[in-house]
Amino acid sequence: MSEKILYSYSALFDTPDKIIHAAKTVAEKGFKKFDVNTPYPVHGMDKAMKLTKSKIGWVTLVFGLTGTLTAVTMMGWMMAVDYPIVIGGKPYFGLPGFGPIMFELSVLFGAVITVVALLMFFLKLPNNSHPVHDTEYMKNVSSDKYGILIEATDPKFNKNEVEALFQELGAEKILPIYFDEEEISFKPKIFDKKFIGFLVIVAAITSLSVYGTMNKVLYMIPFSWMSEQGKSIPQETSKVFKNGSDMLPPVKGTVARGYLPYRFKGQPDKAAELLVNPLLPTEENLALGKTKFNIYCSPCHGYLADGKSRLNGNFPAPPTLHSNKVRNWTDGRIYHVIMEGQNVMPSYAHQLSEKERWAVINYIRVLQRSFNAKESDLL
Amino acid sequence: MSSTLNKVDYVKKDLPPLLKKLAYGLTAVGLVLVILAYLTDHTRSAYNNVILLMFLISIGLGSLFLVAIEYLGGAVWSTPFRRIAEFLAAILLIVPIVAIPIYFNMHELYHWLHHEAVESDPVLKGKAAYLNIKFFTIRVVAFFAVWILFYYLITNNSKKQDTTGDPELTKRNIRLSAIFIPIFAITLTFTAIDWMMSLEAHWFSTMFGVYYFAGIFLGGITSVTFLLVYLNEKGNLVKGLVPDHYYSFGVFMFGFVNFWAYIAFSQYMLIWYANLPEETIWFIHRWEGSWVAVSLAIIFIHFVIPFFVMVSQGSKMNAPKLKFMAIWILIAHYIDLYWIVMPTFSPKGAVFGWIEFGFLVLGLGLVLLVFVLKAKNNNLVPIGDPKLQRGIDFRL
């Protein structure tokens, strides 16, 4: 064990009055490095010890106002610059609405930073335990005695004088306090490996648990106005049906409205015999037929269905539709050609709805009649 | 605990002559001005009379409330000064007299008294069960009576203690205070609604009672603080009172300036946000013409300036600062009441003339006069109170 060094002289007193008197006298004698320890706060002690006012209030003020300013700029930026939304007809920069946030942030910044500053600078974290805490003196003053100690490093310190002074003040007990060198050095422990390691571990655990809680366990979408819609997204499994899809394939044999399957596949004669044109050749139907014919049929068959196509020989020219054969065909037979195509002519079932097909046929009939007009038609 | 009288160093001294001169002078000047005012423009005077009434209720009721919370909280530090609050609470005795001139001009002040207006107005019709002259009168008389009753009960016990020193009286006052405080809360809320909120009978704010409470507390604490600091400097109080004793009065003044701002802002912000026409109209009236300037000035006079002056610990114990700020905040409270009441009288813009000035002078004069008269035959310190010695020994 190395040699002990004198840290301070301490004295214990019985009553609060005596300790106030002692503190006053010691302060008046010009001692600077002394402290008083009592089991509870003794009123009037600050003045007796001639303590200057704590500066911590400034920290609170400065950071409280920082909080206010942060809130104004944050809200102003978000509400008026970055993402302006009209809310209840209020101006974008609606100061009264920011009020509560300004208040909250002032309190938050002020309070949290005051505590941090207290711990860091005034309590000299991480040196949170003073060696005096492990002494007989501290045991006494934390139960029923009032103690004062004067540090040996005080320029006015003199062993015998201090002892005499304490005696004069009516001390009940006078205790010198010794520490070994290690204890008394008060090396700042900020760069201590253990402390740094502790900080890193705390930081890691805190971040991980916060991340886990906020993003995994308790994740809440801040606004669900548009991102949360009652719809299923492609490539995503859904909970609607057991097989993970949210739509089942239609029952076998289901047919969509207006898309009845063609009944006479490969049976032109049956089609000719059984299919009946349901449309009357009204002006409206003929206009529809003309439009659709000109779009879908005329490129090959020509505007007049006479086979004079605009294909310029790039495709086998179709025969005229004014032949006796076609003229004598029933509407059902022509319908069959549209549905199935014929040799090189492809099917037009997908381009034309049922009604449009019959309308086109009506229009073909009109064209045929115009090529073979009767005398009476000319009137 | 000793039931014998404290051996405190108190010798009753005459009040400083300046205080007496001010009390009589201000009251006389104020009274003349007010009578002239009523003769020239009785409507405007009646509005000012409402301000004066609310101002006096603030100080009187606020002081009685301070006495009550001292008993209820078992506070020791304020005991040496309790008499000052007790004397100021005597203002409640003259409050009914101040209310009488208003009563004769009610018809000009309150729209809800106009029969034909109420008949054709569904909103007023709906409120008619509450806002009618009969019920109004009953409430006003009942409230005045209750306040005066508690004033007598509490202060008489306190006074009796000067000679007997009986701690039982303290216990009795604690019980009385416990009963008084809920009654105080209810009566002050309805007082604020009846006299001030109903000036614009369509408007309503659920925070209005609390808003007036903030004013009441400030009215009480500032008057008490000014007088106690002043009288302590003049040596009228007991020996041994130091700035440490002032500290909590400063804290209360500072705290309730903030409380007022908090309530005023909350009331404004909620109405601003909800944006309901029947609620915003009140603030729109106070944003018209030169009222804008008054509205903005109040923020600074009643909050920002007192906040920064009072924020440090030192200024809460600094006697000159305390005296100055006590008067400042008291006047700010008067301006606040003016801002609540007067826009109904002159919606186009603020008016301030010798009439307004006269009522303010009378108000300050009456406060001092009541205090001076009460202090004449009573001890300025509750010398029989068992807590007194501990109160004097109080240090931060």
Image (spheres, coloured by chain):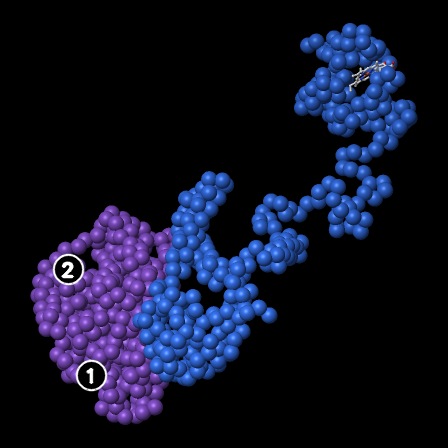
Chain colours: A blue, B purple
Question: With respect to residue A350, does B73 lie above or below?
Answer: below
Query: Which residue lies at the image location 25% right of the left edge and 68% below the top edge?
Result: B222
Q: What element does badge 1 sit on? A: loop
Q: Residue B10: which numbered mark, if any?
A: 1
Q: Could you tell which of marks 2 and 1 lies nearer the N-terminus?
A: 1
Relative placement, left or right, of B57 versus A5 is left
Residue B224 rendering spot, x and y as whole percentages: 24, 72
Binning the other alpha carbons within 10 Å of mark 1 as few (below 14), some (14 to 19) or many (20 upward) gives some
Give the number of the mark in front: 2 or 1.
1
Image position of A135 (left or right of A250): left
> Label 2, label 1: how many angstroms apart (C-alpha)?
39 Å
Tell me the quarter of the image containing the N terminus of chain B: bottom left
Q: Quadrant of the C terminus of chain B?
A: bottom left
Of residues B64 and B201, the one drawn nearer to the viewer in this rendering: B64
User: How many marks overall?
Assistant: 2
> Is B370 in front, or is A49?
A49
**Residue B124 appears anywhere in the view:** no
Can residue B375 be seen here? The reply is yes
* Extreme residue toward the top, this view: A312
Mark 2 is surrounded, within 10 Å at the Cα level, by few (under 14), some (14 to 19) or many (20 or more) other residues, namely: some
* Residue type, label 2: Phe
Identify which residue, A119 or A24, lies in the foreground.
Answer: A24
Q: Position of residue B51 (x, y in %)?
A: 22, 64
Where on the picture, by quarter, is residue B278? bottom left
Q: In the picture provided, is B257 more to the left or to the right than B49?
A: right
Chain to which the residue tagged by mark 1 belongs: B
Residue to which mark 2 is pinned: B357
Task: Assign a secondary structure to mark 2.
Answer: helix
